Image (tube, rainbow, N blue to C red):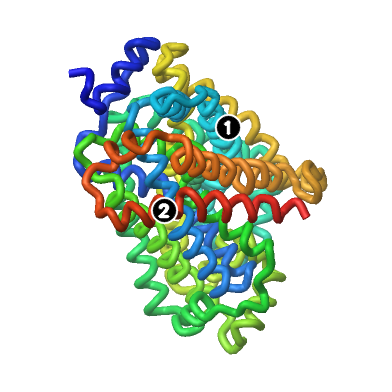
């Protein structure tokens, strides 16, 4: 029995120490649902439109697509593969894969940096998601008398308010994760994802029927390369890693619960396509409404106006909210949009918390519940810095010109995530035994395999490496 390669990880686990098992997803589609839930989040519905707006539209969108296809997708396959191989948390998954390939167990450091990135990401993710929760009520109550800008200031100037909603969102995340894979995450994504699909389609249809569709389409899909610089690449790459939840263990942890008979390649393609589709649909839900709000202005003029009004992170909270304030049924459409954002955020935040919780509980350091409490409390405390960066600390610069929240984003999203992804690519491409990889990938078209191999060995490490180095200058 023991010469069967598939038995080896279990064997190693038993030899090394008895790690607690987490079990696998029950339904055949659950992995796709959960991983898509992880991928689709604030990054798609808030981050993608605002970055596309900030970075000049079509050209950014095109570079972003390339990052997803050439770098993100090959790394997603790698992460799922390493996770499923051992069925353990990213730290142990990297360690086991390294030991099986006769490499140094120091590769587990990739799992550790991932957990650090996760704690930092969750800290500010929860603050913004909390603001979305708050906006469900703000946008329902708005009378059109108060301007969106004032509303936004009211909501963010009070640190008590932000802190309250940050806490509510963190507790929701904690409750789902502490209930476990089957009773918490699996059950939750089965409710949240259909809801998200329905709300999104509703929003897009609404925008198509009532908004300036043509302007939105030409803004999103006609590239203007004069606006592209090295920052555009860094921003698009960071966005691709963030949006696909790569480089920090979420997808690896979810991959660990994937049943053996499921095909990793086709599953990754589904998740990456759905994620990209949702980003585009979010653009198609938001920009037609924004452009129709600035009726009579050209696209460029609108962008100038929007910039004054808080394009950038304020895009949904100020610009879109003021469109909601102004339009018929805005008090109904507004809350629907913010419920959509909150649902998407929750199905992501649970996946940010999971890798660390999986590690502490499989090592039997703490129970799952206690692990979830400890890690979310840590993120919650760090999140207070992001809460304050909207008000009391708005002038405090942490790294360079960045306030607290932006510094967390810079460390975790723009650096740790790509770095983690690059190391995973290097490990799979150059250090992991090929027989193990083939064993895990199952039946795969040899040409597709060769292409993937090429991307993971060369394109992903070099591409990510160049972009990471370029920001130093
Ligand atoms: N992918 C999520 C989003 O787009 C965020 C996320 C990042 C989730 C990292 C998990 C890990 O909002």
Q: Mark 2 packing: few (<14 Cα in 10 Å), some, or many (20+)?
A: many
Instruction: Return the residue at label 1.
Output: 113
| Residue 454 versus residue 210 in the image, above or below | above
Q: Residue 183: image x %, image y %?
A: 28, 29
| Residue 60 versus residue 351 in the image, above or below | below
Separation of residues labelled 2 and 1 (CA atoms): 21 Å
Query: In the orientation shown, which residue stands out farthest toward the bottom?
Result: 296
Residue sitting nearer the eye, 289 or 265:
265
Residue sitting nearer the eye, 462 or 326:
462
Q: Are marks 2 and 1 in contact (CB under 8 Å)?
A: no
Using the rendered image of the protein, determine whether residue 231 is visible from the camera's viewpoint. yes
In the figure, is residue 232 to the left or right of 46? right
Q: Quadrant of the C terminus?
A: bottom right
At a point 38% along the width and 69% down the height, the residue shown is 204
> For numbered disc 1, what is the local secondary structure?
helix
* Residue 73: image tag: 2
- Number of marks: 2
């Amino acid at each position: 029995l023991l010469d069967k390669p598939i038995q080896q990880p279990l064997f190693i686990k038993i030899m090394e120490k008895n790690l607690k098992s987490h079990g696998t997803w029950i339904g055949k589609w659950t992995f796709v649902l959960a991983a898509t839930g992880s991928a689709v989040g604030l990054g798609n519905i808030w981050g993608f439109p605002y970055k596309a707006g900030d970075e000049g539209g079509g050209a950014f969108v095109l570079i972003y697509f390339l990052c997803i296809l050439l770098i993100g997708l090959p790394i997603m396959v790698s992460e799922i593969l390493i996770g499923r191989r051992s069925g353990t948390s990213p730290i142990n998954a990297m360690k086991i894969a390294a030991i099986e390939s006769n490499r140094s167990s120091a590769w587990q450091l990739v799992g550790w940096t991932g957990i650090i990135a996760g704690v930092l990401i969750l800290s500010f993710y929860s603050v913004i998601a909390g603001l979305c929760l708050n906006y469900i009520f703000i946008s329902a109550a708005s009378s059109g008398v108060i301007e969106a800008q004032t509303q936004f200031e009211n909501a963010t100037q009070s640190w008590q308010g932000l802190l309250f909603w940050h806490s509510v969102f963190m507790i929701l995340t904690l409750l789902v994760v502490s209930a476990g894979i089957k009773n918490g995450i699996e059950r939750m994504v089965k409710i949240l994802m259909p809801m998200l699909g329905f709300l999104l389609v509703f929003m897009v249809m609404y925008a198509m029927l009532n908004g300036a569709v043509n302007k939105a389409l030409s803004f999103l899909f006609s590239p203007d390369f004069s606006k592209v610089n090295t920052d555009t690449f860094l921003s698009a790459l960071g966005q691709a890693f963030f949006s696909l939840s790569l480089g920090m263990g979420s997808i690896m942890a979810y991959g660990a619960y994937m049943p053996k008979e499921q095909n990793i390649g086709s599953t990754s393609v589904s998740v990456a396509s759905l994620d990209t589709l949702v980003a585009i649909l979010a653009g198609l839900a938001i920009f037609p409404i924004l452009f129709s709000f600035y009726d009579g202005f050209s696209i460029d003029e609108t962008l100038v106006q929007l910039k004054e009004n808080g394009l950038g992170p304020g895009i949904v909270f100020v610009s879109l909210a003021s469109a909601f304030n102004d339009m018929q049924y805005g008090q109904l459409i507004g809350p629907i949009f913010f419920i959509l954002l909150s649902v998407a955020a929750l199905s992501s935040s649970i996946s940010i918390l999971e890798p660390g919780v999986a590690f502490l509980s499989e090592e039997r350091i703490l129970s799952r519940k206690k692990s979830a409490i400890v890690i979310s409390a840590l993120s919650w405390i760090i999140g207070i810095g992001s809460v304050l960066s909207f008000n009391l600390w708005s002038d405090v610069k942490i790294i360079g010109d960045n306030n607290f929240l932006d510094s967390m984003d810079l460390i975790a999203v723009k650096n740790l995530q790509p770095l983690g992804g690059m190391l995973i690519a290097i490990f799979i491409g150059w250090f992991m035994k090929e027989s193990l990889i083939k064993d895990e990938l199952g039946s795969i078209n040899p040409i597709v395999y060769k292409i993937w191999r090429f991307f993971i060995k060369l394109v992903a490490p070099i591409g990510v490496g160049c972009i990471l180095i370029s920001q130093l200058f």
